């Protein structure tokens, strides 16, 4: 039998960068571990539909694992586990390392906001015996995908007296739900001539919320009145309370396995909870790290990271400054020696749409966590572009620990682009590279990831935290 390898085979094995499905390199036991890890991830997805709910979820998990809320002036020693919440919409988990904090912290940063439909400040109106909500979409969406699917409503309302009312309706199978209606094909001849970008226009993303009028002979907006009456009874609110509210309509699909082989997960909001969960779990599971580690679960990435809960603000820098002060150091001394995995998703190759990809430089599902050296658009505009030295270091960490990883780039040159929080952290004088999970149908109401890639992203964060 010719089981002796030819010279070409031997040389190719030695010299070529091998790309293969992670299944070929994993034991059945390792694959089971990955699948089991994803059961926890699915629970998190179903419980955390918004940045506020993700923050609450991580805080509850952190408390169970012995983390306590950061208190200024309190002394923390190596092994102390702390968390700091930023305005209910971002949270940082830290474990104090044995080494002097001047040697830097190890950061894994991911975002917990996802594309969705936000309610406008004056959302409720009545038209032709229907009650509807006006929306303003959040993040980059293909608007036509958000019609004719069940929606849930999550968020908070701050009443005039300052009281906070939490809203979470539509995710339980017994709950009522909401929907953006679309035109029937029979009457859509004109609509079908529109460009896909405008197939549904922003002002057409109106959510149907009721249809029965308040029973009365009087004139007036009786359907709207009936809805306000129900909302007043349930939440104690009046119409003006919408002005001080953040209400987010999200797809009411729960996470489910995808495929006969159950190798994938379909869900709303993988981007970027699929990296936030691994990053948070790596911090929660860390045992007595050498270097102080920090998992940053942030808001506002999908709208460009601006705002005081996004990473283009100073909140993470200030917290690192707080940690530095505990050991008599300055924040900048810590930052310049720090290193960060910006954990965010990348596009997965889709065989139905091969034209957007340079296959040699695109991520594939089931090939492990994606290392993305640079994001941006056009001539690498708007990216921090990780140095060869830092990518080399991260690569050694992953290879030495058996983390299965691949490289990725967001599409062919000049075909589009995008960014992550990486550049905002790099601009603080920190070494940063993007890593994350490849996603099919990114930013759609129902996105798909591979379980093995989710688990490898957890391993990547954990090994990065533990490395010298
Ligand atoms: Mn993202
Ligand atoms: Mn995104």
Image (tube, rainbow, N blue to C red):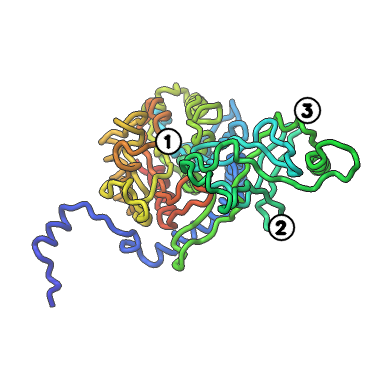
User: What separation in Å lies between label 2 and label 3 (alpha carbons)?
Assistant: 31 Å
Which residue is at a point 40% across and 62% down the rendered structure image?
30
Mark drawn on residue 160: 3
Numbered marks: total: 3
Please tell me which of labels 3 and 1 falls first in the chain: 3
Image location (x, y in percent) of residue 113: 54, 39
Please tell me which of labels 2 and 1 falls first in the chain: 2
Bin the neighbour count of mark 1 within 10 Å (Cα to Cα): few under 14, some 14-19, many 20 and up.
Answer: many
Quadrant of residue 31 within the rendered picture: bottom left
Identify the secondary structure beneath mark 1.
loop
Q: Residue furthest right?
A: 217
Bin the neighbour count of mark 3 within 10 Å (Cα to Cα): few under 14, some 14-19, many 20 and up.
Answer: few
Quadrant of residue 60 within the rendered picture: top right
Q: Nearer the viewer, residue 164 or 58?
A: 164
Question: Quick check: 294 left or right of 213?
Answer: left
Q: Mark 1 points at which residue?
A: 420
Which residue is at a point 74% across and 44% down the rendered structure image?
130
Which residue is at a point 31% across and 47% down the rendered structure image?
357
Image location (x, y in percent) of residue 58: 57, 44
Image location (x, y in percent) of residue 277: 50, 47
Q: Name the residue under label 2.
A: 174
Quadrant holding the N terminus: bottom left
Q: Does the residue labelled 1 lie within 8 Å of ligand 1?
A: yes
């Amino acid at each position: 039998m010719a089981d002796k390898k030819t010279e070409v085979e031997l040389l190719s094995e030695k010299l070529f960068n091998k790309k293969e499905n992670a299944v070929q390199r994993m034991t059945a036991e390792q694959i089971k571990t990955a699948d089991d890890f994803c059961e926890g991830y699915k629970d998190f997805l179903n419980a955390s539909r918004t940045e506020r709910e993700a923050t609450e979820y991580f805080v509850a998990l952190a408390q169970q694992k012995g983390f306590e809320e950061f208190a200024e002036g309190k002394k923390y020693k190596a092994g102390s586990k702390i968390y700091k919440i930023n305005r209910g919409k971002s949270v940082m988990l830290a474990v104090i390392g044995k080494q002097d904090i001047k040697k830097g912290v190890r950061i894994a940063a991911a975002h917990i906001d996802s594309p969705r439909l936000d309610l406008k400040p004056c959302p409720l109106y009545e038209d032709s015996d229907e009650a509807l909500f006006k929306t303003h979409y959040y993040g980059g969406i293909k608007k036509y995908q958000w019609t004719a699917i069940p929606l849930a409503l999550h968020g908070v309302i701050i009443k005039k007296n300052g009281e906070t009312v939490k809203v979470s309706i539509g995710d339980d199978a017994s709950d009522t739900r909401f929907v953006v209606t679309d035109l029937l094909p029979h009457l859509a001849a004109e609509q079908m001539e529109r460009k896909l970008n405008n197939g549904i226009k922003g002002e057409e993303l109106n959510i149907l919320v009721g249809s029965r009028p308040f029973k009365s002979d009087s004139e007036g907006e009786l359907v709207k009145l009936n809805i306000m009456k129900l909302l007043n009874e349930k939440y104690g609110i009046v119409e003006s309370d919408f002005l001080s509210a953040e209400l987010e309509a999200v797809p009411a699909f729960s996470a489910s396995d995808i495929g006969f082989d159950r190798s994938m997960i379909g869900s709303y909001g993988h981007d970027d909870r699929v990296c936030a969960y691994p990053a948070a779990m790596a911090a929660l599971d860390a045992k007595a790290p050498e270097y102080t580690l920090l998992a940053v679960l942030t808001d506002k990435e999908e709208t460009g990271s601006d705002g005081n809960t996004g990473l283009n603000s100073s909140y993470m820098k200030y917290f690192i400054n707080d940690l530095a002060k505990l050991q008599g150091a300055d924040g900048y001394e810590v930052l310049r020696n720090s290193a960060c995995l910006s954990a965010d998703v990348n596009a997965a190759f889709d065989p139905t749409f091969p034209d957007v990809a340079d296959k040699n430089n695109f991520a594939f599902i089931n090939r492990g966590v994606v290392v993305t050296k640079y994001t941006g658009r056009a001539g690498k505009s708007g990216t921090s572009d990780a140095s060869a030295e830092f990518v080399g270091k991260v690569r050694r960490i992953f290879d030495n620990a058996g983390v299965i990883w691949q490289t990725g780039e967001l599409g062919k040159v000049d075909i589009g682009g995008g960014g992550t929080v990486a550049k905002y952290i790099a601009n603080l004088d920190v070494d940063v590279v993007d890593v994350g999970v490849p996603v099919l149908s990114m930013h759609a109401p129902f996105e798909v990831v591979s379980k093995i890639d989710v688990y490898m992203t957890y391993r990547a964060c954990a090994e990065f935290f533990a490395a010298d």
